[in-house]
Image (spheres, rainbow, N blue to C red):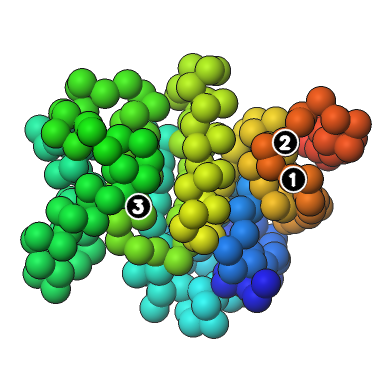
Amino acid sequence: MNAIVRLNEISVAFGGETIYDRLSFDIKDGEFLCIVGRSGCGKSTLLRVIADLLTVDSGEVAIGGRPASEAWQDIAFVFQSPRLLAWRSAKDNVVLGQQLRFGSAVDRASMHRKARELLALVGLGGDGHKMPGMLSGGERQRVSIARALAVDPKIILMDEPFSALDVKTRHHMRAELVEIWKKTGKTIVFVTHEIEEAIELADRIVVLSSKPTTVKSVIELDAARPRDLGSSKLKAVRAELQILLNAH
């Protein structure tokens, strides 16, 4: 796979503190990449850098061979909180993403048709009329994923999107996300603080150091999905990640 995101020797500092110190790695087109690291190392901030919401002091951020500042339409976000408008139905929340991105360039009927298709994709085909308050936490996060997909991005940046869910729902959502990723072929960059989540989801795991942050390690996983986290191979990956994250 070719690189769709390239971070080359990026450095960022603010408030007198160096956040990234010549950090470099590539993200492959169509891969599921997880980013892990100790609390405060700048995992979520790195998504802002990729999306050009935070300008680097030095180095280069390229999306599809273009500067990040020119590629914002290739990117969509899914946050820890679904961030749905309480007064709009599930379907209209998905439509909203298209309205904000495309304005009048796409006709209303097409937006609504795509919203219905994507709600069906995330398992909410019969729930488009429901208001956010009528949906469970997992269902609201499915709507936010559909909203991200609705603008047809090449890359979806996900910032700990399942961390607020209960354990059972979180496991279910991980499995659903893998299926959505397989069906859509999108590149997913997923920030998590949970080792098991990264192992279950990722093609590759980028391990960040403490500040000033660099890439400590990149771990590749080729185990078939769904993954047996109790297998000896994945137990070894878990042990390696624990050592990396506990080391200063």
Q: Are marks 3 and 2 in contact (CB under 8 Å)?
A: no
Q: In the image shown, does 236 or 23 lie closer to the viewer?
A: 236
Q: Is residue 15 visible?
A: no
Locate the C terminus by quadrant: top right
Residue 180 appears left or right of 144: right
Q: In the image shown, does 59 or 152 lie closer to the viewer?
A: 152
Q: Is residue 204 visible?
A: yes
Q: Which residue is mark 2?
A: 227
Q: Position of residue 57 (x, y in %)?
A: 55, 69
Q: Assess disc 1: are there few (<14), some (14-19) or many (≥20) residues with their C-alpha within 10 Å of its C-alpha.
A: few
Disc 3 marks which amino acid?
Answer: Ala
Q: In the image shown, does 108 or 133 lie closer to the viewer?
A: 108
Secondary-structure class at tag 3:
helix
Quarter where residue 152 is shown: bottom left
Q: In the image shown, does 132 or 15 lie closer to the viewer?
A: 132
Q: Position of residue 245 (x, y in %)?
A: 78, 36
Q: Residue at x 76, y 31 (%)?
A: 228
Q: Assess disc 3: are there few (<14), some (14-19) or many (≥20) residues with their C-alpha within 10 Å of its C-alpha.
A: many
The CA distance from mark 3 to mark 2 is 26 Å
Q: Which circle, 1 or 3, is nearer the viewer?
A: 1
Q: Residue at x 22, y 32 (%)?
A: 127
Disc 1 marks which amino acid?
Answer: Ala
Q: Are marks 1 and 2 in contact (CB under 8 Å)?
A: yes
Q: Which mark is residue 224?
A: 1
Q: Which residue is mark 3?
A: 148
